Image: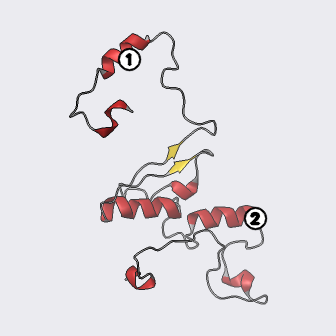
Amino acid sequence: RVGRYSPVGDLGWIANAGLLSMPSDRTNYRGNNPTQIFAHNAMQHDSKRNDLFDFFAGSGVIGRMADILNIDKGIPANTFSISGSQILLVGEGGYGGPSPFTLSRNGIDAFNQFPEVSTDSIKELNKRTTSDSGFFGET
């Protein structure tokens, strides 16, 4: 049980801190590890996947966590990137988890970025909220 590691129920994970498939030393690290542990690009790629033996080929560690949270545990979770498509965020194929969102490095686009749509039309679509519209109705 995870709870035994933290008396208040809080627990944090550290992923992508480096990869070794088994304990190794300088005489056997090349044979023991399928990744190139001194190649930055290979370590980045394999750390994002955290799947040295291709049990979950084509997916990333955060995407697989989101799959489990959403499908197995019923806890809504999404994955977001501001740096293009990332293997880290891709879940296991066919599992049914969330698809990654890719956002712009420049932030979210303006709400009415098309001047041909009048502000009056937008106000009419949204109408005025009432007291039972919910807390976020006017935000």
Image position, residue 36 (x, y; %): 73, 71
| Number of numbered discs overlaid on the protein picture | 2
Element at badge 1?
helix
Vertical comparison of 38 with 113: above or below? below
Q: Amino acid at mark 1?
A: Ile
Q: In front here: 100 or 1?
A: 1
Left or right: 37, with 76 as reference point = right
**In the image: residue 48, left or right of residue 28:** left
Q: Which quarter of the rendered picture does the C terminus lie within?
A: top left
Q: Which residue is mark 2?
A: 40
Assess disc 1: are there few (<14), some (14-19) or many (≥20) residues with their C-alpha within 10 Å of its C-alpha.
few
Q: How far separated are the C-alphas under marks 2 and 1?
A: 49 Å
Q: Secondary structure at mark 2?
A: helix
Per the image, the residue denoted by label 1 is 122
Quadrant in which residue 49 is drawn: bottom right
Q: Earlier in the sequence, mark 2 or mark 1?
A: 2
Q: Residue at x 48, y 9 (%)?
A: 116
Residue 20's image quarter?
bottom right
Q: Quadrant of the N terminus?
A: bottom left
As drawn, which residue projects farthest toward the left?
132
Amino acid type, callout 2:
His
Residue in the picture at 70% in, 83% down: 31
Viewer-nearest of labels 2 and 1?
A: 1
